[in-house]
C-alpha cells in the first residue's frame, strides 16, 4: 500500500498572517492543463494527492490558501489537483512514478516532468521548490541570443520578459525602452508586455498597467490583475526595506489601497511589520504589531499565536517586544488551547524571566500533548528541563 509522508513537528501548524485568494486550481483534464500551459508559456503544477492523506489535507487547508503562495503560483503555473487513486489520476500516478503523498509535480508544456517534491511542505519550502522548477525550465539563455540578434516583435518580448522575471533578472529598463518606441496600446501583445513587465509599483510600467487596465483585464482575469498589483506593491516594499525609504513604503501601501482595497488591511500591517523589523525601529515595529492585533488577528487564536511567534523571532532579546509578544501568546493560549500555543507562550515567559508561569504553561502543553500530540512530548519535556535549570 502506498505510504503517506508525514512530518510531525509543531512548525507544520503555522499559517501565514496574510491569508487571501490562494492557489487557483484549473478544472479540466491533465491534457487540457498541459495545452493551456504550453499556450501561456508556463509549467503545470500538479498536486498529486490521495483522499486519505493527512499532509495533503494540511497543505490544501493552509499552504495552498496563503496569499503569497497563491500570487506566485497563479502567476507562473497552471495549477491542477489530481487524486492519484481515482479517474485519470491512476494513469498519471504510474506515468510520473508517484509512490507517496503528497507528491508535488512540475511539468512542462510537452508533458515532461521538470521537478518533483514529496511530502507536506511549509510555504517557504514549497515556494523554493517551485522556484527551482522554474529555474530548471528556464529558457532565458536561448531567448537572450534571439534578443541579441535583434528580435523585437511584441510576442517575443512578452516571452523574453516573462522568462527574465522568472529567473529574477532585471527587465524593467528593457520594457520601458520597448514601450517608448512601440506605444501601440491597442495591440494585445503590447498590453501583455505591460502586464508581464510590471514588477514593482514604483515604475512607469505600473502606471501604464493602471491606465490601460480595462483592456488588460480583457486579457487576464480580475484575480490575476489584482495579484499583479499586489505583487508589484510587495516588490516596492522590498525596495523600501533595501533603501530604508519610508516614502517607498507609503507608496506601496497607497497604491495597494487605491487599486485592491479589499486586501489593504492585511497588506498594511504586513508591510509595516516587515519594514520596521528590517529597519530595526522598535517603537514603530511595536505600533505595527499592535495594529495587526487589532485589525487582522483580533481574537483569532491562531493569528495571535503567529504574531507572538514572529515577534519572538524578529527581536529575540528585546524586552519591550517580548513583553508585548507575551500578551498575544497568552490570548492565543487562552482562546485556542492548543499544544503549540502553550509551548510558545511558555518560551516567551521563560525569556521574560517568569519561570513559574513558564513552567505552568509548559506543563499545560505537555498535558495536551499526551492526549492529542504525543510526537511533541520530547520537545516540551526538554523545555521543562531548561526552565527548571
Image: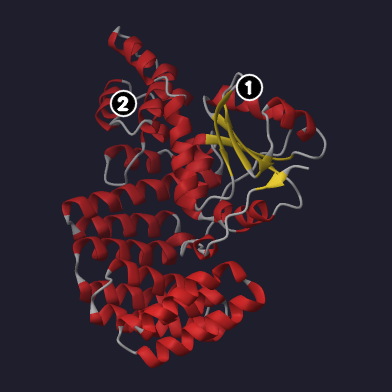
**Does residue 252 appear left or right of residue 330 in this picture?**
left
Quadrant in the picture for residue 173: top left
- Residue sitting at 68 percent across and 56 percent down? 54
**Callout 1: SS:** loop
- Residue sitting at 23 percent across and 73 percent down? 284
Q: Position of residue 129 (x, y in %)?
A: 48, 39
**Does residue 148 appear left or right of residue 104 in this picture?**
left
- Residue sitting at 44 percent across and 81 percent down? 384
Q: Quadrant of the N terminus?
A: top right
Residue 160 makes an appearance in the image:
yes
Q: Position of residue 97 (x, y in %)?
A: 68, 29
Q: Which mark is residue 6?
A: none
**Callout 2: SS:** helix
Mark 2 closeness class: few <14, some 14–19, many ≥20 residues within 10 Å = some
Which residue extends farthest right? 87
Q: Position of residue 307 (x, y in %)?
A: 41, 72
Q: Which mark is residue 179?
A: 2
Q: Position of residue 91 (x, y in %)?
A: 78, 28
Q: Is residue 235 above or below residue 330?
A: above
Q: Is residue 308 above or below residue 173?
A: below
Frontmost residue, 133 versus 116: 116
CA gap, disc 1 and disc 2: 34 Å
Frontmost residue, 106 versus 369: 369
Mark 1 closeness class: few <14, some 14–19, many ≥20 residues within 10 Å = some
Q: Are marks 1 and 2 in contact (CB under 8 Å)?
A: no
Which of pointers 1 and 2 lies earlier in the amino acid sequence? 1
Instruction: Provide the residue designation for mark 1.
Output: 111
Which residue extends farthest bottom? 356
Give the mark count: 2
Amino acid at each position: 500500500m502506498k505510504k503517506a509522508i508525514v512530518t510531525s513537528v509543531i512548525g507544520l501548524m503555522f499559517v501565514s498572517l496574510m491569508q487571501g485568494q490562494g492557489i487557483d486550481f484549473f478544472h479540466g483534464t491533465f491534457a487540457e492543463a498541459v495545452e493551456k500551459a504550453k499556450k501561456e508559456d508556463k509549467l503545470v503544477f500538479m498536486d498529486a494527492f490521495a483522499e486519505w492523506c493527512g499532509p495533503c489535507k494540511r497543505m490544501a487547508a493552509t499552504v495552498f490558501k496563503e496569499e503569497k503562495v497563491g500570487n506566485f503560483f497563479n502567476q507562473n503555473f497552471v495549477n491542477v489537483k489530481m487524486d492519484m487513486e481515482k479517474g485519470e489520476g491512476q494513469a498519471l500516478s504510474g506515468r510520473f512514478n508517484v509512490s507517496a503523498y503528497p507528491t508535488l509535480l512540475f511539468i512542462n508544456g510537452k508533458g515532461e516532468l521538470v521537478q518533483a517534491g514529496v511530502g507536506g511542505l511549509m510555504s517557504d519550502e514549497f515556494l523554493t521548490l517551485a522556484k527551482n522548477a522554474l529555474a530548471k525550465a528556464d529558457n532565458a539563455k536561448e531567448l537572450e541570443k534571439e534578443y541579441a540578434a535583434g528580435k523585437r516583435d511584441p510576442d517575443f518580448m512578452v516571452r523574453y520578459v516573462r522568462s527574465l522575471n522568472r529567473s529574477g533578472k532585471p527587465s524593467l529598463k528593457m520594457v520601458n525602452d520597448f514601450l517608448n518606441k512601440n506605444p501601440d496600446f491597442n495591440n494585445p501583445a503590447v498590453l501583455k508586455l505591460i502586464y508581464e513587465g510590471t514588477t514593482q509599483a514604483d515604475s512607469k510600467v505600473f502606471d501604464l498597467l493602471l491606465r490601460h487596465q480595462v483592456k488588460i483585464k480583457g486579457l487576464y482575469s480580475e484575480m490575476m490583475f489584482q495579484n499583479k498589483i499586489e505583487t508589484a506593491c510587495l516588490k516596492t516594499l522590498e525596495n523600501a526595506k533595501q533603501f530604508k525609504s519610508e516614502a517607498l513604503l507609503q507608496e506601496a501601501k497607497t497604491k495597494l489601497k487605491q487599486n485592491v482595497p479589499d486586501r489593504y488591511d492585511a497588506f498594511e500591517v504586513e508591510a509595516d511589520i516587515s519594514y520596521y523589523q528590517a529597519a530595526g525601529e522598535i517603537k514603530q515595529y511595536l505600533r505595527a504589531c499592535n495594529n495587526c492585533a487589532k485589525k487582522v488577528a483580533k481574537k483569532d487564536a491562531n493569528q495571535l499565536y503567529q504574531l507572538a511567534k514572529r515577534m519572538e523571532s524578529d527581536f529575540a532579546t528585546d524586552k519591550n517586544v517580548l513583553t508585548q509578544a507575551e500578551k498575544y501568546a497568552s490570548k492565543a493560549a487562552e482562546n485556542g488551547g492548543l499544544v503549540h500555543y502553550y509551548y510558545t507562550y511558555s518560551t516567551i515567559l521563560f525569556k521574560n524571566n517568569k519561570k513559574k508561569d513558564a513552567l505552568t504553561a509548559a506543563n499545560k502543553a505537555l498535558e495536551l500533548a499526551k492526549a492529542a500530540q504525543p510526537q511533541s512530548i520530547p520537545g516540551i519535556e526538554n523545555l521543562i528541563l531548561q526552565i527548571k535549570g
